[in-house]
Image (cartoon, helix red, strand yellow):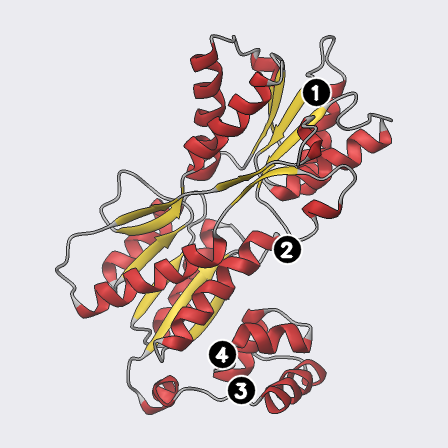
């Protein structure tokens, strides 16, 4: 069965745009709508019979609320969610939270107005004050994806952030690096704090002291990563290796290193959280932590369906393992 992800790829638009065209949840520019509809015809996309329940007044529709950032991780996650929802015969309506709690609350209120039966959400910082009360006032099953909150007793799914980060830092220390810079993500996100804990854990295990000046917030963005990398390079004792906590910051850091004439890994090693399709095409190839993004998305839908079918079931938190992709950027000789 053709999914919205496949239609989006063929039309050159986002999955959320396809969702708006299919469900009529937002105005789409005529030319863009025509392009999406053309792709749907060419691919033979058809809504599952239960997906038409929105118009019929039945609740076989689920919502997805997350940032529509360009980070490839989110695209793979959406693909997993869309594919699993399609296999289950569920309609999917997506909204972009812009990683902003206020916008997130408004977007989810719009989803609730469409009588969704369940929700998958990657919450923004501050969601406990705005979005969580909204979900409690309009009780529907929901699953938190990617950004796990250990103090919240709800279904959640994400990756093993701390263990994966510690493994990469262990590897860099084993190569002789004792001054390892870290570009951290958005403050307040559980993924940012978990990866930072992994960084400190590896140093603690190896008996290597951490210079706090080596840990700089890169705001999970390319621009933030570039700025943070420059700050590291300008230190009196710059690091000999850098770990970037997501792939957007990795791109920014690489741009800074190139502008500064720093050769990787000859002058400075680099490793990063998040693998992406072209990581192996860089020269040198990038050592990364590969998340099972699509599997995380699929698991989130599976947990949601379980909750929809059994509201009284005990909440589950699923942590999927990551894979370290050893390439040359960390100084390894063997692929």
- Give 270 or 244, whichever is nearer the viewer: 270
Q: Quadrant of the C terminus?
A: top right
Task: Say above or below: 212 vs 81.
Answer: above
Label 3: which secondary element: loop
Reading the image, the residue beneath label 1 is: 232
Answer with the quarter of the image where residue 172 lies. top right
Q: How far is disc 4 from disc 3 in space, using C-alphas?
A: 18 Å
* Of marks 2 and 4, the one in the foreground: 2
Label 1: which secondary element: helix
Reading the image, the residue beneath label 4 is: 25
Image-based side of 175 in relation to 53, left or right: right
Q: Of all residues shown, which one is farthest toward the front?
A: 334
Label 2: which secondary element: loop
Q: How far is disc 3 from disc 2 in space, using C-alphas?
A: 25 Å
Quick one: label 4, few (<14), some, or many (20+) residues within 10 Å? Answer: some
- Percent across and percent down for residue 232 are 70, 20
Q: Residue at x 27, y 67 (%)?
A: 305
Reading the image, the residue beneath label 3 is: 45
Answer with the quarter of the image where residue 135 lies. bottom left
- Give 299 or 324, whichever is nearer the viewer: 324
Quick one: label 2, few (<14), some, or many (20+) residues within 10 Å? Answer: few
Reading the image, the residue beneath label 2 is: 70
Quick one: label 3, few (<14), some, or many (20+) residues within 10 Å? Answer: some
């Amino acid at each position: 069965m053709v999914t919205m992800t496949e239609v989006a790829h063929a039309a050159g638009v986002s999955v959320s745009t396809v969702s708006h065209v299919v469900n009529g949840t937002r105005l789409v520019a005529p030319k863009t709508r025509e392009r999406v509809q053309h792709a749907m015809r060419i691919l033979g996309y058809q809504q599952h019979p239960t997906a038409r329940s929105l118009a019929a007044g039945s609740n076989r529709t689920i919502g997805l609320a997350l940032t529509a950032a360009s980070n490839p991780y989110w695209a793979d996650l959406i693909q997993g969610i869309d594919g699993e929802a399609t296999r289950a015969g569920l309609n999917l309506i997506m909204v972009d939270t812009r990683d902003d709690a206020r916008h997130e609350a408004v977007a989810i209120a719009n989803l609730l107005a469409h009588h969704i039966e369940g929700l998958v959400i990657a919450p923004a910082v501050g969601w406990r004050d705005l979005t969580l009360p909204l979900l409690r006032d309009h009780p529907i099953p929901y699953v938190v994806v990617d950004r796990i909150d250990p103090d919240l007793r709800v279904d959640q799914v994400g990756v093993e952030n701390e263990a994966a980060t510690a493994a990469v830092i262990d590897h860099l220390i084993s190569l002789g690096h004792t001054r390892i810079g870290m570009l951290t993500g958005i403050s307040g996100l559980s993924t940012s704090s978990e990866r930072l804990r992994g960084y400190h854990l590896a140093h603690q295990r190896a008996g290597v002291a951490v210079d706090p000046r080596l840990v700089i917030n890169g705001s999970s963005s390319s621009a933030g990563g570039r700025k943070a990398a420059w700050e590291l390079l300008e230190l009196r004792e710059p690091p000999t290796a850098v770990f970037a906590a997501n792939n957007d910051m990795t791109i920014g850091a690489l741009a800074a290193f190139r502008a500064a004439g720093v050769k990787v890994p000859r002058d400075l090693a680099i490793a990063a959280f998040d693998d992406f399709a072209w990581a192996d095409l860089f020269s040198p190839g990038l050592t990364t932590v590969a998340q099972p993004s699509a599997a995380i998305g699929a698991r989130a839908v599976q947990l949601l369906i379980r909750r929809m079918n059994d509201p009284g079931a005990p909440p589950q938190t699923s942590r999927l393992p990551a894979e370290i992709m050893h390439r040359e950027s960390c100084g390894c000789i063997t692929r």
